[in-house]
C-alpha cells in the first residue's frame, strides 16, 4: 500500500481515538459550567471546550482533505 494511504488511515484513527477519549472530560467541564456559572474557573473551562471544538473541526477538515487526496492519487 501507498504511504499516503497509511498516513490517512493513521491520522483518522488516532484522531478519532483522541477526540473520543477527550469527549468525557469536555462533558464534565460543560456540566461544571452549567452548575457553577459564576465560578472563576468557568471561563477557563469554556475556553478549553471551545478549543476542543476547533480541534475536532480542524481534524475533520484535514481528514476529508487527506481522503480526497488519496482518492485523487489512486483513481486520478
Image: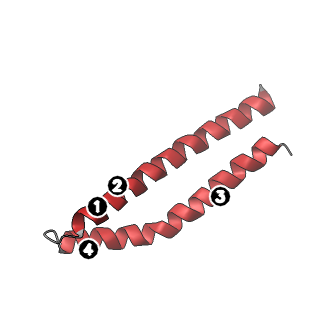
Dot 1 falls on a residue whose secondary structure is helix
Q: In this view, does 12 lie to the left or right of 28?
A: right
Q: How far is disc 4 from disc 2 in space, using C-alphas? A: 15 Å
In percent of width and height, residue 10 lies at 70, 54
> Which is nearer the N-term, disc 3 or disc 4?
3
Q: Which residue is drawn at 70% across and 47% down?
A: 8
Mark 2 residue element: helix
Q: In this view, does 16 lie to the left or right of 71?
A: left
- Can you give x and y, in whole percent of width and height, for residue 46 in the image? 28, 61
Please state which of the two labelled residues, at mark 1 or mark 3, is closer to the viewer: 1
Q: Marks 1 and 3, Cα distance to the nearest angstrom? A: 27 Å
Q: Percent x, y for residue 64? A: 59, 40
- Give the mark nearer the N terminus: 2 vs 3: 3
Local secondary structure at mark 3: helix
Name the residue carrying label 3: 13
Q: In this view, does 68 lie above or below 57?
A: above
The quadrant in which the C terminus is found is: top right
Q: Which residue is pictured at 36% across the width and 61% down the height?
A: 48
> Mark 1 or mark 3: which comes first in sequence?
3
Disc 2 to disc 3, how far (Cα)? 22 Å
Residue 32's disc number: 4
Cα gap from disc 1 to disc 4, whole angstroms? 10 Å
Q: Distance between the residues labelled 3 and 4?
A: 30 Å
Task: Give the residue at mark 1.
Answer: 46
Left/right of residue 10 with respect to residue 40 in the rendered view: right
Label of residue 50 in the image: 2
Distance from label 1 to label 2 (Cα)? Answer: 6 Å
- Which residue occupies the extreme right position in the image? 1
Amino acid at each position: 500500500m501507498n504511504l499516503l494511504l497509511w498516513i490517512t488511515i493513521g491520522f483518522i484513527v488516532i484522531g478519532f481515538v483522541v477526540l473520543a477519549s477527550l469527549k468525557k472530560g469536555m462533558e464534565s467541564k460543560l456540566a461544571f459550567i452549567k452548575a457553577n456559572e459564576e465560578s472563576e474557573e468557568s471561563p477557563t473551562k469554556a475556553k478549553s471546550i471551545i478549543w476542543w471544538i476547533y480541534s475536532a473541526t480542524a481534524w475533520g477538515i484535514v481528514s476529508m482533505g487527506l481522503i480526497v487526496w488519496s482518492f485523487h492519487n489512486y483513481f486520478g
